[in-house]
Amino acid sequence: MFHNHSPLIIAGPCSAENRQQVFQIAQALKETGKVDIFRAGIWKPRTMPGTYEGPGESGLLWLEDVQKELDILVATEVATPAHVEKALKHNISILWIGARTSVNPFSVKELAHALSGTDTTVLIKNPINADISLWIGAIERIKQAGIKKIMLVHRGFTSLNPAPYRYDPIWKIPIEIIKRYPDLPLLCDPSHISGNRQYIEQISQKALDLNMKGLMLEVHNDPMRALVDQQQQITPAQFVEIIERLKKRKENSTNQSYLEKLEELRGQIDKIDHEMLHQLASRKEVVTEIAKLKFQNNIGPLQLGRFQKICQERIKWGQSLGLSKEMIEELFTTIHEDAVKYQSDLMKTF
């Protein structure tokens, strides 16, 4: 779609502040030769009233001039049909639907109607809630409006404990989106996920390692004086350093030695998985006996104390074997939930 570079790079300030700031950043980024699209927020959906909400329609003039004078495509966020109308009037090439908008099917439906019949490129960020169906719903509504040029942006999700990041990446959700929409480029927004410039590079590399097609980065000429999101913006010089250090992994190799060794190792994985499934089947047989015993003694299938003990012990065992706490916790939560459901269903047949 815009593959002048691999990966595709979108960069610019979180928010447009004034004409001079916009042009200074756009010029600096163009000179790097590493940017495909210049981004800047014109309308900023702020959590708290009284904070900077962007320049509004006057900022569209700045972006339009950047596009003409610097010959670089520009992008901005839209949240209402009026935003769409004004952005298109100023020939803004690319529009994105933000996380606070994609979470609302009513808002997405209105935007889809406003975009219908246009040849606009639309980026759809994941909803702020970790609900993949909401993201899919937003994608489908925009597709049904006849929009042919669609890209997706992973920007993380709200979470009770996203530490050390601002938003939880929950990587399994964008991975599932890649599976469901292999023809739609999925980009990553490390600036929003991190909330702190020190993590931008590692998140960017993770995204590329997961075969995401590009990055959307917030770049400001003077981040510590930015009117919004000071901590997650980087300077043009820092931007160049990060981009140059990133490694784009190959998807495949024709090296015969590599392919033979990979096949051998995958064979070992297949054998281990087969044994693991047999063990899970054996575990289910024991769960069946537990269900019978509970039924005979009028005991319910769910016992939270036992589940908590399982989690604590399995995490401890797993970590001693070099496994991550998160993986062990998720694995045994799934196993336990399935066991409780199985016991409940089984008790209905006794």
Image (cartoon, helix red, strand yellow):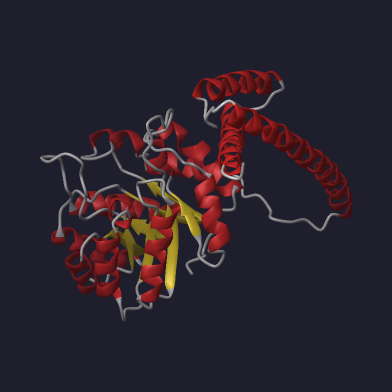
Q: Is residue 212 visible?
A: no
**Residue 190, image quadrant:** top left
Q: Is residue 102 visible?
A: yes
Vertical arrangement, residue 306 with respect to residue 19, above or below = above
Rendered residue at 14%/60% (across/down): 58
Furthest-bottom residue in view? Answer: 117
Q: How far from the left and from the top, in percent, is residue 333?
A: 56, 33
Vertical arrangement, residue 204 with respect to residue 71, above or below = above
Q: Observer-nearest residue: 287 or 252? A: 287
Q: How far from the left and from the top, in percent, is residue 183?
A: 55, 67
Rendered residue at 55%/54% (across/down): 176
Q: How far from the left and from the top, in percent, is residue 269?
A: 80, 42
**In the rendered image, which quarter contains the C terminus?**
top right
Vertical arrangement, residue 299 with respect to residue 108, above or below = above
Furthest-left residue in view? Answer: 50
Q: How far from the left and from the top, in percent, is residue 264?
A: 88, 46
